[in-house]
């Protein structure tokens, strides 16, 4: 017996499914939608406030987004892609605030300057060259650079106090960076969707299996995690926004596009400080350089966080080895994902990334005292008693086929869609929730092509995301207009002067 028949089935109630649900509902309120979540509440995995770093990734401070070309010049391609993508999120969130779907902005986004900080002559030179390459572009024109310790003391006193005055240091700053609680965004969206007649949320249901029927629809099996009750749902379109749980479901779908994909799970931990005397001395997200051999997601940063209206400091992440795909997943997740079609990519990545695996195992064995030693490289006067260790969310990095190497490890995000556009899985975790809007618009462009062309979806998208269909990277006037509007709506504009 079929329990429900819907146009759209959203698996998982995190940042990705909720963003797609909100966009689709605004485009066509008559679409019937079901969201299925295995936990007792939405946004409890990677999207939960303390499970991610809450950085509104705009490419202002993340040094790993820029690389050095063979001729010594800076490659700023990635920042020029990520910054406009984040601007699209700001535009959509502004729209949702104006529709009363998102709450008062300070409940989910707060102005937090984004800074990069380095020490040592080579790193200072790298940062200066990075600044020179970036700030000439209108996307980054408000970026400031300083190698004057007195200026840096004003920017981040905690980090400068107790530092050797002879040490060469430098930093960049963009004052209108942000700290975001993606959990509040996701839960607010779902709360609003639940008020609609055409939307349902089933909690505590784990999607176990799915297959495509001859008529192109998907038949999806799910079980209640406490009562074991089985439900069967049919859907015209399925979105696997299950975070770390997306890969196993993609594999079960059996679509040819799923072949060869595997996952490399990485765990995370933070040091967190709630002592107001310390918290009130820092108002920034200060990103450093990843240690040599460390993966990009372990770039250390000392951040102001605002969660549930309370300010705290976060330092990390400390990446580690794990075999779980979800924080509340199973230690057998990794082994269960091994298939004949992904064995070669998996083994090739294991062979080519022995250093990374060794690094992650080593990191997982570090004590709290070791973590505080790392913090003291940033914040010299840090005391262990002011900090506690928290477990962050899991990331499942993508492993895919590679024609020469056999397999390749990727640190980005990938949308894997069936050829007929009836099923999409979102794999990977970076830049993550910050660019969910752009990624979900891409899903709509790929899977709802006819509706975009024939119905009024394009003008509707433009109402929600005013820069839709245009290039913020090429049009300085458009960027200025859009940025001024979003920073003002989201109350991030105290420092936007232009
Ligand atoms: C340590 C860390 C730091 C990060 N820092 C940042 C940052 O600073 N900025 C940023 O933008 N992004 C960051 N990210 C990435 C960001 O958190 C994720 O990209 C984003 O939250 C992913 O959202 P999601 O909806 O895909 O996944 P999730 O939030 O994990 O949601 C997936 C949901 O699916 C459910 N689910 C899984 N399997 C099933 C199943 N079989 N049936 C039913 N439900 C299922 C899960 O319970 C979960 O609720 C970070 C991530 C981590 C781990």
Image: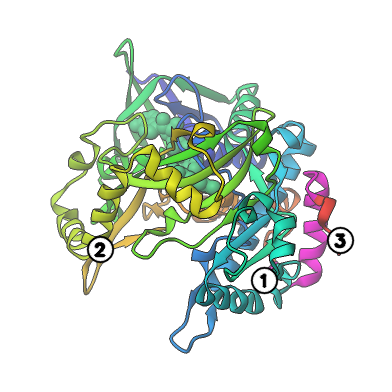
Q: Dividing the picture into quarters, in which one does residue 172 lie?
A: bottom right
Looking at the image, residue 9 lies above or below residue 67: above
Name the spot of residue 417 as percent of width and height, x first: 39, 52
- Distance between the Cα atoms at labels 3 and 1? 23 Å
Q: Residue at x 44, y 27 (%)?
A: 36
The residue singled out by tag 1 in the image is 147
N-terminal label among 3 and 2: 2
Say which element carries label 3.
loop
Looking at the image, residue 417 lies above or below residue 11: below
What segment is highlighted magenta in the picture?
471-492
Seen from the viewer's position, the closer of residues 475 and 291 is: 291
Seen from the viewer's position, the closer of residues 163 and 204 is: 163
User: Which residue is farthest left?
Assistant: 340
- Mark number, residue 401: 2
- Distance between the Cα atoms at labels 3 and 2? 47 Å
Q: Give the class, few, some or many, for how many residues have Cα within 10 Å of label 3's Cα (few <14, many ≥20).
A: few
């Amino acid at each position: 017996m079929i329990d429900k028949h819907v146009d759209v089935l959203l698996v998982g109630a995190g940042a990705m499914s909720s963003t797609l649900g909100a966009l689709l509902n605004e485009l066509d309120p008559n679409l019937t939608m079901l969201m299925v979540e295995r936990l007792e509440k939405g946004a409890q995995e990677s999207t939960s406030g303390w499970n991610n770093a809450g950085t509104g990734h705009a490419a202002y401070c993340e040094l790993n987004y820029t690389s050095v070309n063979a001729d010594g010049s800076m490659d700023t391609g990635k920042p020029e892609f990520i910054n406009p993508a984040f601007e699209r999120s700001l535009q959509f969130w502004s729209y949702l605030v104006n529709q009363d779907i998102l709450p008062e902005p300070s409940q989910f986004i707060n102005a937090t300057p984004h800074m990069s900080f380095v020490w040592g002559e080579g790193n200072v030179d790298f940062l200066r060259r990075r600044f020179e390459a970036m700030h000439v572009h209108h996307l980054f024109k408000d970026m400031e650079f300083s190698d004057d310790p007195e200026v840096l003391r004003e920017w981040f006193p905690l980090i400068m106090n107790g530092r050797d005055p002879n040490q060469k240091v430098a930093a960049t700053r963009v004052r209108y960076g942000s700290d975001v609680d993606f959990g509040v965004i996701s839960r607010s969206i779902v709360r609003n969707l639940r008020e609609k007649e055409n939307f349902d949320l089933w909690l505590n249901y784990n999607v176990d299996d799915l297959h495509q029927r001859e008529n192109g629809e998907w038949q999806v099996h799910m079980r209640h995690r406490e009562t074991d009750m089985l439900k069967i749902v049919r859907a015209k379109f399925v979105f696997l926004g299950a975070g770390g749980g997306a890969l196993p479901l993609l594999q079960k779908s059996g679509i040819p596009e799923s072949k060869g994909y595997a996952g490399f799970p990485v765990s995370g931990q933070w040091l967190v400080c709630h002592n107001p005397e310390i918290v009130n001395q820092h108002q920034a997200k200060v990103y450093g350089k990843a240690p040599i051999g460390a993966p990009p997601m372990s770039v250390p940063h000392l951040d102001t966080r605002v969660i549930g209206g309370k300010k705290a400091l976060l330092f990390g992440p400390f990446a580690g080895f794990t075999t779980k795909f979800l924080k509340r997943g199973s230690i057998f997740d990794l082994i269960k994902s091994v298939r004949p079609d992904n064995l070669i990519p998996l083994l090739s990545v294991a062979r080519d990334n022995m250093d990374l695996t060794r690094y992650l195992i080593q990191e997982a064995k570090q004590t709290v005292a070791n973590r505080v030693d790392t913090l003291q490289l940033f914040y010299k006067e840090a005391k262990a008693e002011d900090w506690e260790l928290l477990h962050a969310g899991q990331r499942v990095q993508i492993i895919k086929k590679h024609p020469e190497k056999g397999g390749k490890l990727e640190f980005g995000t990938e949308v894997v869609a069936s050829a007929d556009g009836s099923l999409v899985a979102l794999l990977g975790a970076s830049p993550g929730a910050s660019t969910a809007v752009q990624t979900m618009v891409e899903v709509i462009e790929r899977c709802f092509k006819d509706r975009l062309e024939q119905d009024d979806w394009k003008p509707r998208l433009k109402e929600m995301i005013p820069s839709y269909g245009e290039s913020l990277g090429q049009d300085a006037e458009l960027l200025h207009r859009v940025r001024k509007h979003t920073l003002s709506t989201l109350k991030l504009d105290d420092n936007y002067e232009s």
